[in-house]
């Protein structure tokens, strides 16, 4: 799980162009949206693409993303449970 | 119409009011260098496409030189022109949809496949509620640009404008010639 | 005073303004569900030309063809010499020939991807010597173009402006909106409680303006226009309708809301746009003015929308009609706005047209028939 958490942090930094952020800066339980990393709706849509590209998981409903992408931990749990790659 | 500030950016150099700025990098690295050394407080910069980065930096240099951002105003227009529209970023987006077996259209790239987005980025940064417009020309033409900008000042509201040529043909060929003018 | 001389709508619903208005008045649309079209893996609903049946101009792209065909018809209703240097072509388009970026695209010289080059193909067809002005201001381009045309005529830069709005749909555009999850799988429902997204469309529309000292009783005047930015987000509209509200206020000036037959809004049927416009219309004190959206007949025609929807609104007022909002059933926005699915009657002679677009831009234009009464 720890490997997946680190992997996700690196992918998010790359995919969302978070230039000044290091994996160590992202707390596993911290909210990704709103405050925290200050991600917005376009970032959420990019994360949906990332899920399909890297893990083969298709998220059809954009509002489902709110719960899934709440934090790194929720993302990791979701990937663990649903990954096809 | 008074020209208050003027900036020129090419892949090799940057000039503010005719004076060259000390830089070492070239190409898009030059844009990053200027951002890091003179701005560096807007992480969204790294999400922008090249055209937006170019326009954002040009506007920041103009406004820094002018001293007062004139924030939260409705009487400052942002009117930009180019020949290439958003083609550099369009090609990047096309690449995400070109192959049926590697088909992952990118929403972050797609939102930048319109040239006027750079006017929006400048408006967001500064709280400009005034007119934002983007025009595409077959070739750079000062007369057309002048006539269009002057006509825009007939709206009864606009008192100043950030306007000029902002073109990004590809990552190695870009040009900004942007002015801050006042009525 | 800026006067409309002639117009044309060239769309899947008809190739003349009259045919288009007749179809819309009868509640018809060409919105259809497409599966596997244009190499797109996911289905979508859109209003598209039947390209197999369309007359194509040899050596011109799809985009250039419909722009030329539309302008040709509009010009034919006038005595204007389009080759005159005092005539300016203004083109409103978001993506022009973007489909040429596809490796499998029709073979055209590479520079036709450039909007200015494509626009010159259009203006040169009519022998016009001036460089055409392309307005690429996202979805508000069709009003932006009319507004700058107004100002260029007022300033004396030209005497006549041929404003053409056009866009064609493509793999590029449709896939992009799908990636934003902005599309509705079914026909769109502007302002409705069940709305989920927009439909895409393609069309060309032309409106020709000149300047006169006095407006005739049956002539349309472009009274005023304004473009304002939300200064909020590059793709989401401002929750307070900031830019739209300011554009309405600037365009309306002293005109009382009661003089308006209706406000024809952008009304794309996305959750956020329609909510934002309801807020803006209320903030501007226009909640008692009938509001309608035409996206249920054509989908969102991008660069053509501002011109096409203006022309239809003029036709409607000429006909004493407020066109119903096709697809609407039950109001689903937080502020009360007077939207109806049915056509209604009016004897008023002015309307306000609104649009909003990516980049946070918003436009409003006020039109009046026959001058002040």
Image: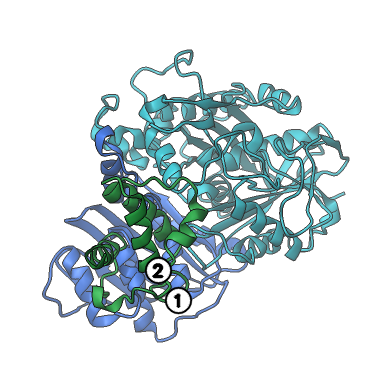
Specify whether residue A60 is in view.
yes
Percent x, y of residue C32: 56, 25
Q: Which residue is mark 2?
A: A71
Image height check: is A57 above or below C33?
Answer: below
SS label for mark 2: loop
Q: Residue at x 81, y 34 (%)?
A: C343
How many circles with numbers are drawn on the protein? 2
Q: Determine whether the residue tagged by mark 1 lies in a helix, strand or loop.
A: loop
- The residue lying furthest to the bottom in this view is B67
Label for residue B132? none
Horizontal side of residue C304 vs C1, given as left or right = left
Chain A representation colour: green
Which tint is chain B?
Answer: blue
Q: Residue at x 36, y 72 (%)?
A: B59
Q: Which residue is under mark 1?
A: A35
Q: Give the vertical position of B81 relative to C122 (above or below).
A: below
Location of the N terminus of chain A (image quadrant): bottom left
Nearest to the observer: residue C86 or residue C336:
C336
Mark 1 burial class by Cα count in 10 Å: few <14, some 14-19, many 20+: few
Q: Is residue C308 left or right of residue B160?
A: right
Q: CA distance from mark 2 to mark 1?
A: 12 Å
C72 or B131, nearer to the observer: B131
Please tell me the colour of chain C.
Answer: cyan
């Amino acid at each position: 799980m720890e490997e997946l958490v680190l992997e996700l942090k690196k992918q998010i930094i790359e995919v969302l162009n978070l230039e000044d952020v290091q994996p160590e800066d992202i707390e596993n339980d911290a909210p990704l949206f709103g405050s925290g990393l200050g991600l917005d709706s376009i970032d959420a849509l990019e994360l949906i693409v990332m899920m399909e590209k890297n893990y083969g998981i298709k998220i059809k409903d954009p509002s489902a993303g709110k719960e899934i992408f709440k934090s790194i931990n929720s993302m990791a749990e979701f990937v663990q449970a649903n990954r096809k790659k | 119409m008074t020209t208050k500030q003027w900036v020129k950016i090419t892949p090799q150099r940057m000039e503010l009011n005719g004076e060259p700025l000390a830089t070492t990098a070239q190409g898009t690295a030059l844009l990053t260098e200027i951002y890091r050394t003179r701005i560096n407080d807007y992480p969204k910069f790294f999400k922008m496409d090249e055209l937006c980065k170019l326009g954002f930096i040009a506007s920041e240099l103009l406004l820094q030189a002018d001293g007062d951002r004139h924030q939260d105003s409705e009487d400052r227009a942002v009117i930009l022109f180019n020949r290439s529209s958003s083609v550099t970023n369009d090609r990047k987006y096309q690449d995400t949809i070109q192959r049926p077996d590697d088909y992952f259209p990118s929403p972050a790239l797609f939102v930048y496949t319109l040239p006027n987005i750079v006017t929006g980025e400048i408006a967001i940064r500064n709280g400009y509620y005034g007119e934002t417009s983007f025009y595409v020309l077959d070739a750079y033409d000062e007369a057309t640009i002048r006539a269009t900008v002057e006509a825009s000042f007939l709206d009864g509201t606009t008192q100043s404008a950030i306007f000029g040529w902002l073109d990004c043909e590809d990552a190695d060929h870009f040009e900004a010639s942007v002015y801050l003018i006042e009525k | 005073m800026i006067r409309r001389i002639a117009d044309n709508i060239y769309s899947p619903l008809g190739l003349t303004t009259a045919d288009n208005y007749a179809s819309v008045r009868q509640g018809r649309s060409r919105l259809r569900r497409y599966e596997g079209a244009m190499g797109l893996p996911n289905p979508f609903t859109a209003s598209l030309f039947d390209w197999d049946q369309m007359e194509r101009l040899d050596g011109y792209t799809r985009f250039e063809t419909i722009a030329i065909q539309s302008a040709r018809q509009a010009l034919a209703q006038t005595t204007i010499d389009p080759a005159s240097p005092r005539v300016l072509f203004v083109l409103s388009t978001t993506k022009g020939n973007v489909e040429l970026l596809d490796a499998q695209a029709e073979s055209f010289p590479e520079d036709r991807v450039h909007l200015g080059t494509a626009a010159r193909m259009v203006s040169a067809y009519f022998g016009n010597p001036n460089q055409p002005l392309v307005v690429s201001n996202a979805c508000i381009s069709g009003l932006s173009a009319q507004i700058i045309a107004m100002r260029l005529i007022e300033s004396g830069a030209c005497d006549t402006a041929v404003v053409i709005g056009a866009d064609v749909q493509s793999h590029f555009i449709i896939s992009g909106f799908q990636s934003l999850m902005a599309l509705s799988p079914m026909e769109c429902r502007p302002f409705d409680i069940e709305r989920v997204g927009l439909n895409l469309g393609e069309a060309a529309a032309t409106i020709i303006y000149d300047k006169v000292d006095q407006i005739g009783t049956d002539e349309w005047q472009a009274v005023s226009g304004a473009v304002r930015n939300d200064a909020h987000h590059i793709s989401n509209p401002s929750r307070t309708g900031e830019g739209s509200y300011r554009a309405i206020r600037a365009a309306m000036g002293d005109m009382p809301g009661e003089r308006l037959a209706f406000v024809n809004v952008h009304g794309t049927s996305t959750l956020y746009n329609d909510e934002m416009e309801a807020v803006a219309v209320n903030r501007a004190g226009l909640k008692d003015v009938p509001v309608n959206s035409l996206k249920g007949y054509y989908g969102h025609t991008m660069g053509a929308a501002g011109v096409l929807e203006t022309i239809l609104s003029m036709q409607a007022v000429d006909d004493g009609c407020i066109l119903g909002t096709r697809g609407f059933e039950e109001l689903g926005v937080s502020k009360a706005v007077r939207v109806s699915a049915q056509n209604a009657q009016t004897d008023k002679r002015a309307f306000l047209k609104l649009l909003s677009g990516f980049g946070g831009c918003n436009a409003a234009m006020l039109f009046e028939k026959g001058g002040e009464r």
